[in-house]
Image: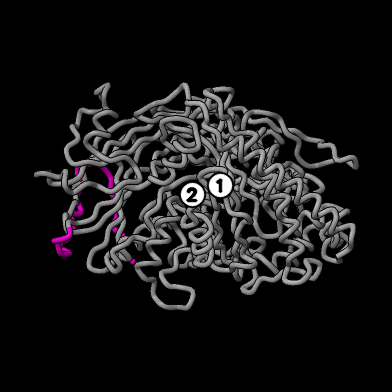
Amino acid sequence: MSFRTRYSLALAFATQVLVLVVSMAASSAERESCTEHTPLRRPFFGDTHVHTTFSFDAWGQGTLGTPSDAYGYAKGEPIGIQPYDAGGNAQAQIVLRRPLDFAIVTDHSELLGETEICRNPKLEGHGSLICRVVRRFPALGYALINGNTYSSENPTRYSFCGDDGGHCREVARGPWRITQDAAEAHYDRTSACSFTTFVGYEWTGMPGGNNIHRNVVFKSEIVQDSPTTYIETPTAEGLWKALASECLDAGNGCGVIAIPHNSNVSNGRMWLTKRDDGTPLRKVDAELRARLERLVEVTQHKGDSECRAGAEDELCAFETLAYARMQDMARPPANFEPVPRIYVREALADGLLEKERLGVNPFQFGLIGSTDTHLAAPGMVDEDEFKGHAAGLSSSRFGVPAYPDQPTFNPGGLAVFWAEENSRPSLFAAMKRREAYGTSGPRIVARFFGGWNFDAEICSDPSIWTHAYAHGVPMGSELDNAARGGASAPSFIVSALRDPGDHGVPSTPLQRIQIIKGWVEGGQTHERVYDVSGDAQSTADVDPATCAPRGKGYGELCDVWRDPDFDPDVSAFYYARVVENPSCRWSSWVCQRARVDCESGDIPEGLDSCCDDSVPKTIQERAWTSPIWYSPPAESTPSQAVLNPSVANGHVTPAQSR
């Protein structure tokens, strides 16, 4: 390492230490109390999955937006995006019509240093072959880097990183510090509590092309000295141990959770029930996983992960990718049959089995959505204004295509937390207790409570939520057996308000609410879908020429549902799915505005997918609540009772067994 480089790094490190001392002193001070504090909690909408120019793949595809830019965009400030001119000036601009309540920048921890070195000509290694390739041929450079790091079973660093990769790890401290400073600078510590940030990063493991990614989110400004990387720690088990030793058990007030995402392209490796050495998961392993993984991303830019498409549940076909490995994105298999354990609903069911075996459920997580934007654009989820997220093969540093990203990708979703106020302590507490839900983009307001004696007419009671908290448990909780009394089955309050569509955002009526139940019986997992509110037979649709909605729907739905097939000796989980009427998919908006005429055959370049029948023209946007779990009392023994296939509460899909 040259003297100049050593001097520059030393100076940068000294500056970072000074900034750290000053910012820690300021941020550790008592924050002002929020003026708006709601004891019965209210929903806060945000994005927990955001990449900026510090992520190698985002920078390689032309993104120059910083963490500070991302937070500014989330608050409603305009930012520039690709393409950029020779002077680095953005030739396009985007703005969020409805600001978010919170956001979390989660740049890849892997290659933070390498990205900075390839970007900065003052750093040693900038002239290396791999950096020159990346700058000149981004797609080729990314393929080389990806094969050596993210997708490798044995990831390594490049020679320009020096002995044991130390140079790259040291340089990575700069972006990591900037990430923390941006989160602090944009966190509103005044009594207005207008916007909340968290420090975070993404641990990006993809061995053999099989996604096992986790977003790591810290409770406060107290964080790891350096993010854990897949390069040095190439297993999820290793990540959990690092987060426990460096944060949870460090005795310094550090709090953290890890959020898995894109299990749909994990090829079955996300929800393994065995340890790194191949032996079965132990109770202590399940406890650590359950301690850290409180939430899961059920939907995002690269596909939906809720459930397996099939005749049993037609709504599982929502934004489903036709492959189970990221490696297959360029050439999806002709006949795709998804492997077991790649969808969240399957993992929730397998968690019940693991609890029977271990006494601990390692897959007891709440459900959220987010974007996985690689444009530093958190919350860009509106179908009619989608510009892509720069995470697809068709994106490049030279411009955003007219048809954003892959036609099978989508704008992603939002995370929603029920909290007393918009502050880090309140929102993080909501994450920990799983009082959270996800949407596919709309700002649907959904609530879900479980109990034993909810009155059938409670939806008309002005004090409904006071009663719900007093006599039941919210989404993300376990039913209290002690409160059961003589009740024959649990009852659930489920409520939804349609997205109001303010600030010029289209608003679509609600169609129905469903409750999904999963249970374990006879050593097998089962699932069933119940329509509980709204109109499952709705004929509402969309005018394909204008994207105008047609037909009736609902502005509000609320119902009390009691499980007609309840067996007190059988473990189960329940979650609600709120479904809108059909609306135009983002791709249809693009094609409509380009005035594509498929019959004439005169199709603009890049818009062939407009005339591809396999690309959906409409969607039914939705929200998914976190589950509520039921466990039999300790003295109960499993029953072999056959569930009653007839239900008085609406349509029921046939039970599935695996």
Q: Amino acid at mark 1?
A: Ile
Q: Quadrant of residue 447?
A: top left
**Residue drawn at (47%, 62%), measured in percent from left and top?**
342
Q: Residue 592 has which mark?
A: none
Q: Residue 222 has which mark?
A: 1
N-term mark: 1 or 2: 1
| Magenta segment main secondary structure | loop
For disc 2, the neighbor class at 10 Å (few under 14, some 14 to 19, many from 20) is: many
| Way the structure is coloured | one colour
The percent position of residue 609, horizontal first and vertical second, equals 66, 48
- Relative to 25, residue 145 above or below: below
- Horizontal side of 471 relative to 197 (left or right) equals left
**Residue drawn at (18%, 49%), measured in percent from left and top?**
481
**Residue drawn at (22%, 41%), measured in percent from left and top?**
451
- Mark 1 in CB contact with mark 2 (< 8 angstroms): yes
Given residues 419 and 505, the one toward you in this image is: 419
For disc 1, the neighbor class at 10 Å (few under 14, some 14 to 19, many from 20) is: some
Which part of the image, by quadrant, shows the C terminus? bottom left
Q: Element type at marker 2?
A: loop
> Could you tell me if residue 134 is visible in this image?
yes
**Residue drawn at (38%, 52%), measured in percent from left and top?**
313
The percent position of residue 48, horizontal first and vertical second, equals 55, 44
Q: Element type at marker 1?
A: loop
Q: Amino acid at mark 2?
A: Gly
Region of the chain picked out in magenta, as a range: 634-658
Q: What residue does disc 2 label?
A: 255
Would residue 652 be counted in the magenta stretch? yes
- Horizontal side of 33 relative to 128 (left or right) equals left
Furthest residue in direction left, as rendered: 486
